[in-house]
Image (cartoon, helix red, strand yellow):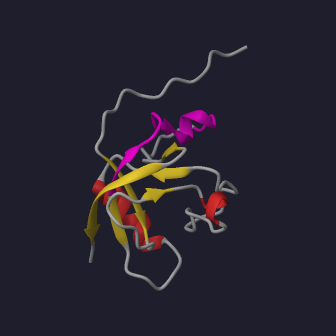
Amino acid sequence: MAPPLQPKQFKGPWYHGTRADIEVGGHVVPGSEVGTANFDYGDTGNDSMVWLSSTHTEAAEYARLAKGISTPRVYEVRPHDSPVNWAEENGWDDEEGVDEWVTNRATVVRRHDID
């Protein structure tokens, strides 16, 4: 049996890109908990986690790709659990350096409007 996966030692900051309007101090929760998908930019089939990025630039791209008519936003967040690299967790060879991390929920510490 393979040993359990350990999160990479990255301390942050962490970002979440979306079109949702969330106040500082509010929580980013998995789409399955609120009845909508947090991750609307592709078909991963998984809305049971919160998607994070370790860079503002990547989070801004995800926000622009998210479905909806609201303004794309990036939130600097504090994860409640240690984020795990989604590609590594799922056995993907991440040659393109895709910045996809997951956690169970996060608290918004700062909001960044983007162009």
In the image, 64: left or right of 41?
Answer: left
Name the spot of residue 3 as percent of width and height, x first: 63, 15
Name the spot of residue 43 as percent of width and height, x first: 66, 62
In the image, 83: left or right of 40?
Answer: left
Query: Residue at horizontal 51%, vertical 44%?
Result: 102
Q: Is residue 5 above or below residue 47?
A: above
Query: Residue at horizontal 53%, vertical 56%?
Result: 29
Query: Residue at horizontal 30%, vertical 40%?
Result: 12
In the depicted view, which residue is nearer to us: 93 or 41? 41
| Residue bounds of the magenta highlight | 76-92
Q: Is residue 76 above or below residue 7?
A: below
Q: Is residue 65 above or below residue 94?
A: below
Quarter of the N terminus within the rendering:
top right
Question: Does the magenta run of residues contain 83?
Answer: yes
Q: Is residue 84 above or below residue 108?
A: above
Quarter of the C terminus within the rendering:
bottom left
Question: Does the magenta run of residues contain 3?
Answer: no
